Image (tube, rainbow, N blue to C red):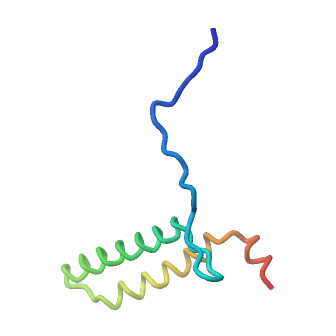
């Protein structure tokens, strides 16, 4: 007798992965990254100010952090393919 395992539940993949705005292809997961970064930044700034910290310091740190993360997470093949 064959052992068949059937998942109890599954989430199907959506039919579209993003929006096409002219020459730009905006993916939903990219939008969620932006929302997550904005929310984390807002929470961090709020907590830092509550602890009598300087808002400019946190904003500067976030700009460096996001810039470096974009460079590190972009596959090298994408950079090499661009002229």
Q: Please, is residue 23 above or below residue 4 in the view?
A: below
Residue at 49% of width from left, 83% of height from top? 64
Residue 37: which quarter of the image? bottom left
Q: Is residue 9 left or right of residue 23?
A: left
Return the residue found at the far top: 1
Return the residue found at the far bottom: 56
Q: Please, is residue 48 above or below residue 17 in the view?
A: below
Residue 49: which quarter of the image? bottom left
The residue nearer to you, when weighing 63 against 19, is 19
Q: Is residue 62 left or right of residue 30?
A: left
Residue 59 x, y percent position in the rendering? 38, 86
Residue at 57% of width from left, 61% of height from top? 16
Q: Is residue 48 left or right of residue 13?
A: left
The residue nearer to you, when weighing 31 against 70, is 31
Q: Is residue 46 left or right of residue 15?
A: left
On the rendered image, what quadrant is the N terminus found in?
top right
Residue 75 x, y percent position in the rendering? 69, 69
On the rendered image, what quadrant is the C terminus found in?
bottom right
Number of dots carrying numbers: 0
Residue 3 x, y percent position in the rendering? 60, 16
Residue 38: which quarter of the image? bottom left
Residue at 28% of width from left, 89% of height from top? 54
Residue at 24% of width from left, 76% of height from top? 47
Q: Please, is residue 5 above or below residue 76 in the view?
A: above
């Amino acid at each position: 007798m064959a052992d068949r395992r059937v998942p109890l539940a599954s989430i199907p993949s959506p039919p579209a992965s993003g929006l096409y705005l002219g020459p730009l292809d905006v993916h939903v997961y990219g939008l969620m990254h932006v929302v997550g970064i904005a929310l984390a930044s807002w929470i961090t700034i709020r907590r830092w100010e509550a602890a009598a910290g300087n808002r400019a310091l946190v904003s500067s740190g976030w700009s460096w952090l996001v810039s470096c993360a974009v460079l590190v997470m972009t596959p090298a093949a994408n950079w090499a393919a661009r002229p």
